[in-house]
């Protein structure tokens, strides 16, 4: 593991344009993926990709934020920033998974939910809040993977899970370092300093109990040898899912509740 990297360096790697995106992970880990579109209310949002697939022969529902690797691809999926329609589509697929007893696997890589006027008019805040509420009550296993950036409620709306995995050079925080620096110091140029304060790297979050497992990356980042990351992530998801498959119903919802109640408690015990 690249333990000597600073938080700011990990942010750069997490944002690398050639870093594997959800389509790469689906092609590598989830054969026979069948995409499903629309929120059955307002429209389709390309920033959220979701559908049914197989994972080691078991039917699962896969949902995640979608980024492109070129400007044209990013324009089509709004640079991975979902609108309310995307979150409602995700919730529709999660409730469908619960109905048919399929585990839910989410892949998160977003700078945050889209903050545009139309998104607000369509109920962005309500859509995110609804996902948080409904995900906490799901009676099927939920595994979330932070693959790149995971910022703000836009990421957490897919992250209320029984197990949260995080790639070694991914970052997970309440907002971007630039936004943090702007709010705290009125100076976005201090974003590297913000990175050190925000506790946003995988090792820091593991210590705080925010995430459950760190998935190793090759030196330099996942984009340099994606097949290594695919292999490691496949192993991690399979192991976590095998444990969660032993439980069903209210036990899974209770486990999820207790997980979030425990967050941060490990670090408090270490304080004098």
Image (cartoon, rainbow, N blue to C red):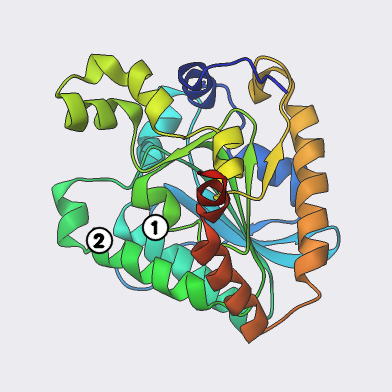
Residue 196, given in percent of the width and then of the height, sits at 42, 24
Is residue 31 shown to the viewer in this render? Answer: no
Residue 88, how many percent across, how many down?
38, 66
The image shows residue 73, relative to residue 33, as above or below, that is above
- Given residues 107 and 1, the one toward you in this image is 1
Instruction: Tell me how many marks there are.
Output: 2
Residue of label 1: 86
Q: Measuring 68% from the left and 69% from the top, which residue is drawn there?
A: 103
Asked whether disc 1 touches disc 2, contact meaning CB atoms under 8 Å apart, the reply is: no
For label 2, the SS is helix
Local secondary structure at mark 1: helix
Question: In the rendered image, which residue does mark 2 sit on?
Answer: 125
Name the quarter where the N terminus is drawn.
Answer: top right
Q: Is residue 55 visible?
A: yes
- Of the numbered discs 1 and 2, the one sitting upstream in the chain is 1
**Crowding near the residue tagged with mark 1, few <14, some 14–19, many ≥20 C-alpha atoms within 10 Å:** many
Relative to 148, does residue 95 appear above or below in the rendering? Answer: below
Q: Is residue 244 left or right of residue 196?
A: right
- Which residue sits at x=55%, y=41%? 205
Residue at image location 51% in from the left, 78% down from the top: 137
């Amino acid at each position: 593991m690249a333990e000597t990297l600073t938080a700011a360096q990990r942010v750069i790697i997490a944002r690398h344009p050639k870093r594997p995106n959800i389509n790469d992970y689906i092609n590598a880990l989830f054969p026979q993926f069948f995409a499903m579109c629309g929120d059955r209310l307002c429209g389709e949002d390309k920033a959220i990709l979701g559908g049914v697939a197989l994972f080691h022969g078991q039917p699962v529902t896969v949902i995640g934020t979608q980024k492109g690797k070129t400007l044209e691809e990013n324009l089509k999926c709004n640079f991975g920033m979902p609108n309310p329609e995307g979150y409602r589509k995700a919730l529709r697929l999660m409730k469908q998974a619960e109905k048919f007893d399929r585990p839910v696997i989410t892949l998160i890589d977003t700078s945050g939910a889209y903050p545009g006027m139309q998104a607000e008019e369509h109920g962005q805040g309500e859509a995110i809040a609804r996902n948080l509420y409904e995900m906490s009550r799901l009676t099927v296993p939920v595994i979330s993977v932070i693959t790149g950036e995971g910022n703000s409620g836009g990421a957490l709306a897919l992250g209320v899970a029984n197990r949260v995995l995080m790639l070694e050079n991914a970052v997970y925080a309440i907002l971007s370092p630039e936004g943090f620096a702007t709010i705290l110091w009125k100076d976005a140029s201090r974003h590297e300093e913000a990175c050190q304060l925000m506790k946003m790297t995988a090792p820091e979050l593991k210590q705080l109990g925010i995430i459950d497992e760190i998935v190793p990356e090759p030196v330099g980042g996942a984009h340099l040898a994606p097949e290594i990351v695919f292999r490691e992530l496949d192993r991690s998801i399979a192991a976590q899912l095998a444990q969660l498959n032993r439980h069903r119903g209210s036990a899974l919802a209770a486990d999820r509740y207790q997980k979030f109640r425990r967050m941060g408690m490990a670090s408090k015990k270490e304080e004098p």
